[in-house]
Amino acid sequence: MEYIVARSLEILAVIVLSTYFPILTYSFFKYRLVRKQEELMLLLERVDLVSTFNRKSLITRLEKEYAPGDYFLPVSFVSMITLLGMILLLPSWIIYDFNSDSYASLLFSGAEFWTEASEYATEKRSVAVIAFAIMGSYISGSRYIYRRFNTVDLTPGNFFSVGLRTIMAALVSLMLSFVITDKMMPGYSENLILVIAFLTGIFPETGFKMLLDRVKIFPKELNEGQVNFSLDYIEGISDMHKIRLGEVGIDNVQNLAQYNFILLIIKTPFPVRTLLDWSAQAKLIVEFRGDYGLLQKAGIRTALDFIDACEDEPGRFEKIAEICGVNQLLLEVNYENFKNDQSVNLLNHFRHYLEQFKLEEKS
């Protein structure tokens, strides 16, 4: 009788855990998305850009960006992966011991799930590794999705990202289980494989690096011909920021410099002041390339700083060239480029608004 109750509770747990993503998505559209629309329109009204960017077109674009139909496939995708993992982890008897009065749940059996098996021991070991990797990915992915929910930044790409990371973690964990043997790691129990699989689920990139270190068959070569500037060149961008920017197609400084600033506000949860600083930095790096770092000798770190430094009084180009060691003609050409760039003018418009708003708050 006890095993019937236990089986029922495990099936219930599978259902509850597997419906987490659909329930959160429903709550996002029901309660949270309205806040995003209100904040955007309030911002544009304060910046006095509602006439420039038609209100109706912006609302339409926002509705397209968060169209409910776009979420069906990615939420189903990650929910099915979660369902599969939870079935392997909790009611494992569905696969191997369905007709048995005594059963072993993988989550509570650990390595005994395969070490005491009379048959299918190797297969059960692989199933256990995959299940624990999916459990780790589920925990990590749930926290990630909930964070996006709180910041009103939940997009279909978030769910695809979680699903793909889960698949990657499961496969990497399985490969690690093939190379980690008693000879390689003497004195450790079989349960260590499950611990590694769980941690790989949370940190799949770390598990992949561990796998490469174990195998050591690929040469380590640096691509010296790389011409793209990574987002590491932007001050203030962390690894988490890079992941989020990558979801909207911004993988390097060039992408950030060319990205529509209004869409950047719509598609990301970062403060406008932060996005303004990042975009202005990116503009400067793209224009000056290898020489952009020299401009910091004159206190210039963004395209807007450069415009301010060059337009106040005559002779500024000569002074900046002398201080920074940058060609004067390059300074003059890039100054004209910035002045004629409408995207830079838009950044400047936002900057003036933010400065005025800050003064109003102080007063």
Image: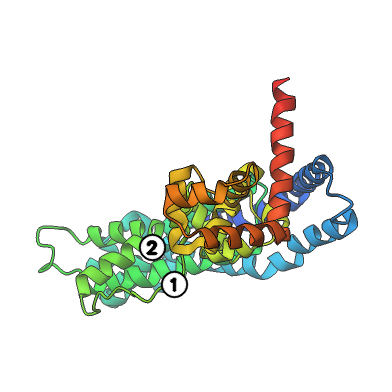
Q: Which x, y percent locates residue 290? A: 43, 62
Q: Is residue 125 above or below residue 325?
A: below
Please give the name of the residue rendered at 69% of the width and 22% of the height, measured from the top-left corner.
Answer: 362
| Structure colour scheme | rainbow
Helix, strand or loop under label 1: loop
- The crowd level at tag 1 (other Cα within 10 Å; few <14, some 14-19, many 20+) is few
- The crowd level at tag 2 (other Cα within 10 Å; few <14, some 14-19, many 20+) is many
Whether residue 299 appears in this view of the structure is: yes
At label 2, the amino acid type is Pro
At label 1, the amino acid type is Val
Per the rendering, the mark at residue 204 is: 2
Q: Quadrant of residue 93?
A: bottom left
- 263, 202: nearer the viewer: 263
How far apart in space, not on screen, are marks 1 and 2 (Cα)? 28 Å
Whether residue 19 appears in this view of the structure is: no
Please give the name of the residue rendered at 90% of the width and 57% of the height, measured from the top-left corner.
Answer: 56
- 97, 329: nearer the viewer: 329
Task: Tell me which numbered mark, 1 or 2, is placed earlier along the sequence.
Answer: 2
- 17, 207: nearer the viewer: 207
Q: Which x, y percent locates residue 155? A: 65, 59
Helix, strand or loop under label 2: helix
Per the rendering, the mark at residue 227 is: 1
The mark total stands at 2
**1 or 2: mark nearer the eye:** 1
Please give the name of the residue rendered at 54% of the width and 62% of the height, measured from the top-left corner.
Answer: 329
Tell me if 279 is positioned left or right of 187 in this view.
right
Q: Which x, y percent locates residue 137? A: 45, 59
| Dot 1 and dot 2 residues touching (CB under 8 Å) | no
Tell me if 190 is positioned left or right of 360 in this view.
left
Please give the name of the residue rendered at 57% of the width and 67% of the height, measured from the top-left corner.
Answer: 160
Question: On the rendered image, what quadrant is the C terminus found in?
Answer: top right
Tell me if 111 is positioned left or right of 311 in this view.
left
